Amino acid sequence: MSETPFIVLSAILFTIGCVGVLTRRNAIVVFMCVELMLNASNLALITFARVHGNLDGQVAAFFVMVVAAAEVVVGLAIIMTIFRTRRSASVDDASLLKY
Amino acid sequence: MIGFWLLAPVMVAAALGILFTRKAVHAALLLAVVMIGLAVMYALQDAPFLFAVQIIVYTGAILMLFLFVLMLVGVDASDSVVETIKGQRLMATVVGLLFGAVLVVGVAQVTVGAVTGLDEANAEGNVPALAQLLFSTYVFAFEATSALLITAAIGAMVLAHRERLTPKVGQAERAAQRMRDYVDHGKHLGPLPSPGVYARHNAVDTPALLPDGSAAETSVSRTLTARGTVRSAPALADDVTVLSRQIGHDGRRDGESGTTGNGRDREPGDQA
């Protein structure tokens, strides 16, 4: 089974994640799109691990998952803190540094 | 290969759904679809360990964390459609389409040679082979991961911790405050009215009727009002009229008038 369909799927998912980060305003949805991009890159890593016949790609995907878990915990805590002080989870409302 | 072609359209459709749904909860559920699809993709490619980790860690832990935070932030917090930068949405879509086209075309044209397959690497099982790599070649990265996880846990605790700036308000202070509100603004002392209890509807989304026939706004939860699922009291009355006409009732209008839940201020059957 060739590797191209998997890589193309991974590219499509990554692109959708990118567009989501650029267009959505809700900080939690933006965060979900970042997760989508991480997952898409994981798919590419695992596909190339199979193509090259060694497990280094799978180990890399495993580390990506660990980093994503840590990132989600801290990121959601930051979103909660911002929500508590500003009563909003929109990325446009946190603009104090602009002025 | 059949699994791939069955799942890939579903995953792309769900991922596109994340872009277009207004409600964050729907986006989280669609993301769960994509992640379970990805888990199956991993299983298809001889990665059973990562298949399990993807389902347990991503779909089980991370998405549940997302849903928890969504519940804390409020389900009715939907996205605003106002663009802060003019034309940003259009520009982002165009850039995204171009980026996607370039990426897909570029990737599709590259060939990396024959697929080796993982049969040899997975000869003694996928998990032992991964463990062999993790605890030999990547052992320093693995140790650094533990430091990262500790840092993340402490960071989350520091961010979630809140110093108390004002003294804790106890029951006595609350009661005194309620009395003060009553004296100053005439605010009602007792609890909020309970939802309406009718012959055919007594759920929490049914507002109680005030003596003048209007619905009591405070008798239904604010969240239900924001979701737009509150029934309107006049519609309930119409409902009963239609029904009584259907069953050939002689027009006695029993049980359609609302009470504020405790039934003290209503005597059954007193309306002709």
Image (cartoon, coloured by chain):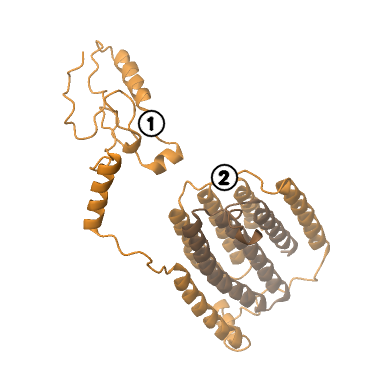
Chain colours: A brown, B orange
How many numbered circles are shown? 2
Q: Which of B141 and B236 is in front in this view?
A: B236
Instruction: Left or right? Give the position of B218 relative to A57.
Output: left
**Residue B231 tag number:** 1
Residue type indicated by callout 2: Arg
User: What is the x, y in percent for residue B235?
Assistant: 38, 23
* Residue behind mark 2: B22
Q: Which of A7 and B45 is in front in this view?
A: A7
Tell me the crowding category of disc 1: few under 14, some 14 to 19, or many 20 or more residues within 10 angstroms, Cα based: some
Whether residue B48 is visible, yes or no, is no
Q: SS class of the residue under badge 1? A: loop
Instruction: Left or right? Give the position of A48 relative to B70.
Output: right
Q: Nearer the viewer, residue B195 or B168?
A: B168
Residue type indicated by callout 1: Arg
User: What is the x, y in percent for residue B231?
Assistant: 38, 31
Q: Quadrant of residue B265?
A: top left
